[in-house]
Image (spheres, rainbow, N blue to C red):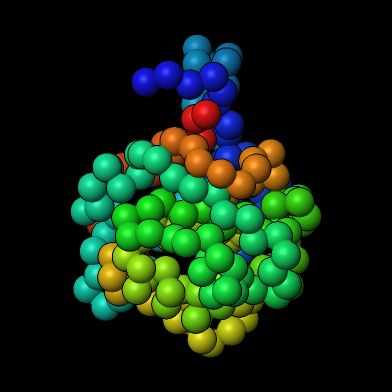
Amino acid sequence: MNYQQIIDISLPLHEGTIVYPGNPAIEIEEIKSQSSGSVLSKITLGSHTGTHIDSQKHVVDRGKPLDKIALETFIGNCRVIDCTSDERSVKVETLQKNNIQKGERILLKTTNSSRGFETFYDDYIFVSPEASKYLADTEVALVAIDYLSIKQRGSKDNRPHTYLLEKNIPIIEGVDLSKVEAGEYFLVILPLKFIGTDGAPARAVLLK
Ligand SMILES: [Zn+2]
């Protein structure tokens, strides 16, 4: 396929990477050094670290783990939706205006991207339960959001997750869309091939 540009929308992973409160921090320890012939590190991280994918198992009892989702879901045409006018949460009206169709891969760009990912803040823009239901009812292929969770910080209302994951629509969290304008792209996001897990970190790029 032809493309002019690769836009990396993944968060950098290092010991200072922000994590959602309560998740394990990234630890990278060199357990062999050059003096022993080669450098080798032990890396500790949570399944929802950095740019990552939530599978059904994350919130659904006996739900599908990530390795049971076909890779075709994560590779293909996608659309970045401008939600930067939405305050507090992504609204149904914004999605309706954008005429979202069944089978689309939808990336929601909010003001989270311009705020950056250097420090964790509680009042990030999340996806409202109604907007999540709209995307689930529309039967999109996947939904990505530019912060570490799709639901409101500290809220017991888990519907932004459950509406989508109950329909086995994967959620990508932690994409950095600061360098991306709304529009159509080709998405490649490949989760590490962990077996049986509720989620996994992934490298995500947009081709244009
Ligand atoms: Zn997650």
Asked which quadrant contains residue 153, the reply is bottom right
Q: Count the marks: how many?
A: 0
Q: Is residue 164 visible?
A: no
Residue located at (45% from left, 81% from top) = 159
Q: Position of residue 87 (x, y in %)?
A: 73, 72
Q: Position of residue 29 (x, y in %)?
A: 58, 38
Asked which quadrant contains residue 56, the reply is bottom left
Residue located at (36% from left, 39% from top) = 76
Query: Position of 141 compared to 159: left or right?
Result: left
Is 132 or 118 nearer to us in this picture? 132
Is 62 or 138 nearer to us in this picture? 138
Vertical side of 15 occupied by 130: above or below: below
Q: Residue furthest bottom?
A: 156
Q: Position of residue 18 (x, y in %)?
A: 67, 54
Asked which quadrant contains residue 10, the reply is top right
Vertical side of 92 occupied by 180: above or below: above
Vertical side of 65 occupied by 165: above or below: below
Residue located at (50% from left, 41% from top) = 184
Q: Position of residue 72 (x, y in %)?
A: 27, 42
Is 41 or 128 nearer to us in this picture? 128
Residue located at (54% from left, 75% from top) = 92
Considering the image in quadrants, where does the N terminus appear? top left
Q: Is residue 130 visible?
A: yes
Vertical side of 16 occupied by 130: above or below: below
Query: Position of 70 compared to 197: left or right?
Result: left
Query: Position of 34 compared to 132: left or right?
Result: right
